[in-house]
């Protein structure tokens, strides 16, 4: 993954945009990784994966509710 400092990203914004089309770019500030810049295509794919995962979780939870495989909140907290 390509890395830039915040100052380099500011000075070379065009390069940042071109690089982000190929792969995500990590931008650091004060020696800490701060943000990732990525292509819209990559972002949309990640968002689609998150939606699919949430849909799967809701379907799994609905099956548990329909089959009665649930516990009340107090029992759950006590089991922790």
Image: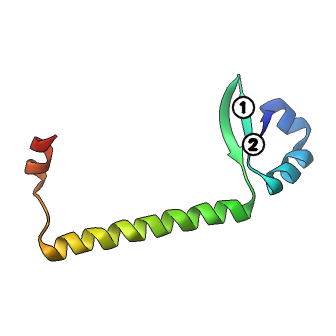
Image-based side of 76 in relation to 5, left or right: left
Q: Dot 2: what SS?
A: loop
Please say if 62 is above or below 33.
Answer: below
Residue under the image location 91 percent in, 46 percent down: 15
Q: What kind of element bears circle 1?
A: strand
| Rendered-image quadrant of the C terminus | top left
Residue drawn at x 75%, y 42% is 1
For disc 1, the marked residue is: 28
State the residue position of label 2: 1
Q: Position of residue 59 (x, y in %)?
A: 32, 73
Quadrant in the picture for residue 41: bottom right
Q: Residues within 10 Å of mark 2 (few under 14, many from 20)?
A: few
Query: Which residue is the extreme one toward the bottom?
Result: 66
**Residue 12 horizontal side relative to residue 59, left or right:** right
Residue 42, picture quadrant: bottom right
Residue at horizontal 14 percent and vertical 66 percent from the top: 69
Of discs 1 and 2, which sits in the foreground? Answer: 2
């Amino acid at each position: 993954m390509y890395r830039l400092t915040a100052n380099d990203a500011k000075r070379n914004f065009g390069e940042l945009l071109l690089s982000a089309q190929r792969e995500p770019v990590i931008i650091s500030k004060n020696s800490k990784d701060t943000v990732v810049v990525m292509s819209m295509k990559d972002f949309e794919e990640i968002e689609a994966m998150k939606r699919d995962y949430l849909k799967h979780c809701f379907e799994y939870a609905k099956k548990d509710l329909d089959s009665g495989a649930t516990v009340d909140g107090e029992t759950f907290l006590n089991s922790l």
